[in-house]
Image (cartoon, helix red, strand yellow):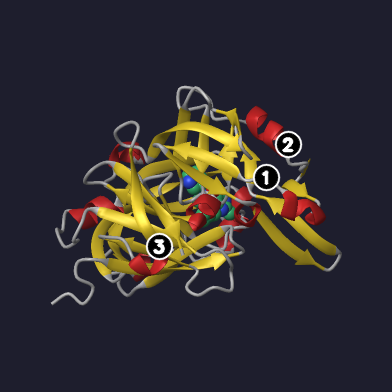
Amino acid sequence: ADPNNGTVPTPLTNYLDTQYFGEISIGSPAQMFNVVFDTGSANLWVPSQSCSPFSTACFTHNRYDSSQSHTHVENGTGFSINYASGTIRGFLSEDVVVVGGLPVVQVFAEATSLSAMPFIFAKFDGVLGMGYPNVAIDGITPVFDQIMSQHILKEEVFSIYYSRDPKHSPGGELLLGGTDPNYYTGNFNYLETREMGKWEVTMKGVAVGVEMMFCAEGCTAVIDTGSSYITGPASSVSMLMKTIGAQLDETGYKVNCETVKMLPSVTFHLGGQDYCLTHEDYIIWQSQFEGDVCIVTFRGLDVPPPTGPIWILGANFIARYYTEFDRRNNRIGFAAAV
Ligand SMILES: CCN(C(=O)c1cnc(C)nc1NCc1ccco1)[C@H]1CCCNC1
């Protein structure tokens, strides 16, 4: 009998409330990698043993060595992926990937070049895309689809818990096949995904305090477990930051820590429910030797049409609202995280 009754947990590490990742293995014998489980993309990539010596980001991370794996299957097709934040280039390989103890034969990319920004700051080695197959580059069947086709999951869903302080253990949990009552309270509210094949929903407004300030006529919200922050159109976010008295510097928006307690809540109106973030949820308070620094976890990001303009709800939103991604019913469920 299956001890987890058709569900498969993977504990996640929380790095400074901004990066959450879990361990997978690739190859036989197992080569271990830390990966972000990312609903904002649909491919698996890890750094390659054959990455160029000039790629610093590659050299500071675990690298897959196909010559050491007897289950490796050659492929060689070119691969490149562009995130707003960086570029990955490499080639495809096939091997046994183990997620939460589940083995799947998976086509993935060996990254031979990783842009230094942002990947030199990554505590993870690679990215395991949890998006839909139709956004997968090179038409590769994503890991979760390979797992669904094994018909061992109780439900064709996966859920994500992100803890809200790095000292908490575990830092988070990916649960394949269901939801974990240890990490949420109350009921789920569900929203249909907007367009087949993307983890995005229609948002009906963004309020600051009690005042509806943005997206009053409706807009798109992407639920991205692989993004640290909440991003919105740069003009909207800069107005929002002005409202809360935040200053933009080279690393992002900051507020004077004395003002944090008085900051207004920011509320996202999704599917007939209001999802409120208080300063506790959107400020990262870092005590540094030269004094405390209060980082605002919002960023301006202009995504060009037809995809944009969009808001991206990332880790700081998910840490407050436990999220279920339902592939069976093409819907996303939110419940209050514990
Ligand atoms: C993984 C690439 N991403 C990042 O935003 C990103 C970049 N660079 C670093 C250093 N970290 C990132 N995310 C950390 C994280 C982990 C979990 C929550 O946020 C995005 C790119 C767009 C698709 N979605 C994912």
Q: Could you classify mark 3 by the number of other residues whose Cα lies within 10 Å: few (under 14), some (14-19), or many (20 or more)?
A: some
| Amino acid type, label 1 | Pro
- The residue that mark 2 highlights is 243
- Distance between the Cα atoms at labels 3 and 2? 32 Å
Q: Residue at x 81, y 52 (%)?
A: 256
Numbered disc 2: secondary structure: helix
CB of mark 3 near ligand 1 (< 8 Å): no
Q: In the displayed structure, would residue 93 be above or below residue 24?
A: above
Which mark is first along the chain, 2 or 3? 3
- Distance between the Cα atoms at labels 1 and 3? 25 Å
Q: Is residue 179 left or right of residue 61?
A: left
Q: Could you classify mark 1 by the number of other residues whose Cα lies within 10 Å: few (under 14), some (14-19), or many (20 or more)?
A: some
Q: Is residue 191 left or right of residue 270?
A: left
Q: Residue at x 71, y 53 (%)?
A: 295
Q: Is residue 1 left or right of residue 20?
A: left
- The residue that mark 3 highlights is 184
- The residue that mark 1 highlights is 264
| Amino acid type, label 3 | Tyr
Residue 199's x, y, as percent?
A: 37, 41
Numbered disc 1: secondary structure: loop
| Amino acid type, label 2 | Thr
Cβ atoms at labels 2 and 1 below 8 Å apart: yes
Q: Residue at x 75, y 36 (%)?
A: 242
- Of 317 and 261, nearer the camera is 261
Q: Is residue 97 visible?
A: yes
- Of 210 and 326, nearer the camera is 210
Which quadrant of the figure has residue 31?
bottom left
- Report the residue that reaches farthest toward the right: 290
